[in-house]
Image (tube, rainbow, N blue to C red):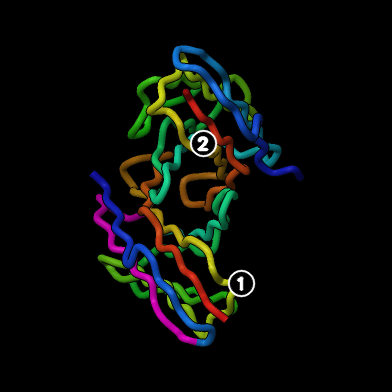
Amino acid sequence: NAGVTQTPKFQVLKTGQSMTLQCAQDMNHEYMSWYRQDPGMGLRLIHYSVGAGITDQGEVPNGYNVSRSTTEDFPLRLLSAAPSQTSVYFCASRKGIDYEQYFGPGTRLTVT
Amino acid sequence: EDQVTQSPEALRLQEGESSSLNCSYTVSGLRGLFWYRQDPGKGPEFLFTLYSAGEEKEKERLKATLTKKESFLHITAPKPEDSATYLCAVQASTNAGKSTFGDGTTLTVKP
């Protein structure tokens, strides 16, 4: 199993550009989440999904969109990048609410 | 609103010097408390899940315990390879799919 994969690993955007961060998992997990991690801080939840076709907002959803058309994929879209979105983004998946999360390697995003 | 506070922010130990990390939480119905380890430039890796007060879990030099208000991660005779950031997260019974993370404790173990 590849586990949770994320692409790209690094990205530089200019203010106002849009892009999609890709996330895929091959463990048939129903739950998937996107987090951002800023220096010296823990993980803040952006959006999450409890199954294909079902998504909901986390604590910092503004400026981001998600969709979940398949169990495997959970892309995160930045609509109009802003410097405040400079961060490291982690995707995670888990079997269910009582289970641990498996994290991808992260995407380091810089917005200039 | 669920809250998780970890202390200290940073901890420096000599090799072999045992200590504990604290995770205090406020949650509306605890479903589970999770400990993760994060190495620089990598995603967090799962260590333990605790579900009810009084529960303990052990793995090598690490032992996690849980009360109704906090969890401790005890590190016995640490080695330099235990250096990492340790994250605590809670899952509430009322917020399906949402986990709340603390800011982490960065542990440095000097040889």
User: Residue at coordinates 45% horizontally, 16% vertically from top-left?
Assistant: A15
- In the rendered image, is residue B20 in sight? yes
Residue type for callout 2: Tyr
Residue B28 forms part of the magenta stretch? yes
Q: Is residue B18 above or below residue A79?
A: below
Mark 1 — on which chain does it sit?
Answer: B
Residue type for callout 1: Glu
Residue B25 x %, y %: 28, 58
Residue range of the region highlighted in magenta in the rendering: B17-32
Q: Residue farthest to the right? A: A1
Q: Secondary structure at mark 2?
A: strand
User: Residue at coordinates 39% horizontally, 77% vertically from top-left?
Assistant: B20
Circle 2 is placed at which residue position? A89
Image quadrant where residue B80 sits = bottom right
Q: Residue farthest to the front? A: A112
The N terminus of chain B sits in image quarter: top left
Image quadrant where residue B69 sits = bottom left
Side of A19 relative to A112 (left or right): right
- In the rendered image, is residue B32 in sight? no
Circle 1 is placed at which residue position? B81
Disc 2: CA contacts within 10 A as few (<14), some (14-19) or many (>=20): many
Side of B31 relative to A66 (left or right): left
Give B70 or A21, whichever is nearer the viewer.
A21
Q: Secondary structure at mark 1?
A: helix
Residue B99 x %, y %: 40, 45
Residue B108 x %, y %: 49, 70
Give B39 or A95, whichever is nearer the viewer.
B39
The C terminus of chain B sits in image quarter: bottom right
Do badges 1 and 2 share one subunit? no
Identify the main secondary structure in magenta. Answer: strand
Mark 2 — on which chain does it sit?
Answer: A
